[in-house]
Image: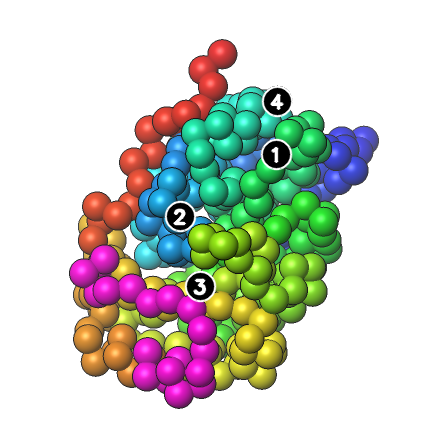
Amino acid sequence: MQTMINGCDISCCTLCPRECGTDRTASYGNCGCDDKLRAARCALHMWEEPCISGTNGSGTIFFSGCSLSCCYCQNQKISHDCFGTEITTKHLAQCMLKLQQQGAHNINFVTGSHFTPWITEAVHMVRDKLTIPLVWNSSGYETVETLRLLDGIIDIYLPDVKYLYPATAREYSWAPDYPEYALKAIAEMHRQVGKPVFDENGIMKKGLIIRHLILPGHRHESIDILKKLTELLPKEEFLISLMGQYTPPKEKLPYKNLNRKLTTMEYSSVLRCAEKLELNGFSQELSSAQAQYTPEFDLEGLPND
């Protein structure tokens, strides 16, 4: 029997590229979640890109679970262990309004792909009361079909492009098809929101920012990713955010390169490529590669009733 959430059948879930077909009313999908909406944090966040965080902060809502589950994830507590609390779509709608009242520049849905029908349902509850943009902050491992559920709802897309080589994606995220899906997802996101639009204070109102975390030992892949993006989209139609914040997990990984931080040489070579390609966007200081910049997932801001 079909179980529909806002028009999507979750009794045979195909929301993400894994297409595990799980009946989420009876079990847990590859994302680690069932049919109960779960979140780990709802609070203002100052560590996004300047045009997202601004002076007041981005209104981030971190969801539990993840369809990608990278071995080096800094948010393993919520992505791998699915830490969080069960909330209703009504609770989620209330969270959005509360963040807006706190002065958030936007509502930032973090890793919500596996909860897309629940999120869109909550947005429709308060759409007429929201006056700030909605941000979709994801791993980039998305299907075009699921992204189309967000067309006309999401104002700003903030995806990762993690890998270009299937072998790397297989090794670190067990997803050799990641490059194929991520590039198609980027094209769909761009189709929906178009080129970047900012207000008079430099806060983004609409558009696409593509993030890329440079991994130790993979600078050549990072350079190839930048080149590929310029083939996929006009460079004035998106912003790039190059991240040097890679922090080795506490438990050693079976990959020597991932047990160290990024070197200055690795980071600088990728930055030089971005400059040569005349890409617009943001870069981080290597000093940001510290665990202290990872949010505390302590259920802050979430309803307890």
Q: Residue at x 38, y 82 (%)?
A: 275
Q: Which dot, 3 or 1, sits closer to the camera?
A: 1
- Quickly name the residue at label 2: 53
* Tag 1: amino acid: Leu
Q: Is residue 95 left or right of residue 56?
A: right
In terms of sequence position, does the residue under pointer 3 or pointer 1 come before the other? Answer: 1
Q: Mark 4 or mark 3: which comes first in sequence?
A: 4
Instruction: List the residue tagged with mark 3.
Output: 211
User: Within the image, what quadrant is residue 130 found in?
Assistant: top right
**Is residue 288 shown in magenta?**
yes
Write the start and end of the magenta stretch as one range: 271-289
Q: Amino acid at mark 2?
A: Ser
Mark nearest the camera among 3 and 2 is 2
Residue 50 vertical position relative to residue 271 in the rendered view, above or below: above
* Cα distance in 3D space between marks 4 and 2: 25 Å
The residue carrying mark 4 is 90
Work out how far the residue at label 4 is from the one at label 1, CA to CA, in angstroms.
Answer: 15 Å
Tag of residue 29: none
Sequence-wise, the earlier of marks 4 and 2 is: 2
Residue at image mark 1: 130
